[in-house]
Amino acid sequence: MEDNIEVIDFLKEASGYNTDKDLLDWILYSAKTVYSEIGSSHRWYDEKNVVINVNDRFISYNWYHMTGDSSVSDMDLEFDWNAVRFVEPYEVTVTKYR
């Protein structure tokens, strides 16, 4: 967590939680998700990037979407605190055809 201590401190202050477990639960289940995108897929899970809005700051983190009966802990997957970072929104123009 030392690489991004400013973001972690911001989240702890905003959430009111100080332990990794409590903070992680708050990030995953209470913070307002504004964007989520599936990255690479594996047999039992998909990796996804999630952006949350906390006090008008956007924060990105990586997590897992389980596709089988196993849980994150069953698969020995862990939250990567070093991947938590402040991000800024940007616009993308997409052309679709019908």
Image (spheres, grey):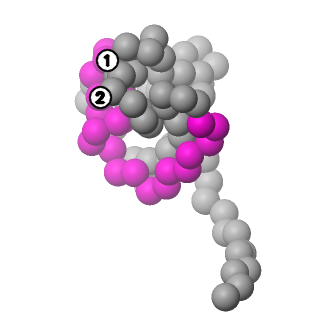
Residue placed at 49% from the left, 55% from the top? 35
Residue placed at 58% from the left, 14% from the top? 2
Residue 25 numbered tag: 2
The vertical placement of 35 against 77, above or below, is below
C-alpha span from label 2 to label 1: 6 Å
Magenta-highlighted residues: 18-41
* Residue 30 or residue 43, whichever sits in front: 43
**Residue for badge 1:** 21
Badges 2 and 1: C-beta atoms under 8 Å apart? yes
Residue 33 magenta? yes
Residue 7 seen in the figure = no
Residue placed at 63% from the left, 19% from the top? 3
Res 34 → quadrant? bottom left
Q: Residue furthest bottom?
A: 98
Secondary structure at badge 1 equals: helix
Secondary structure at badge 2 equals: helix
Residue 59 location in percent, x, y?
51, 43
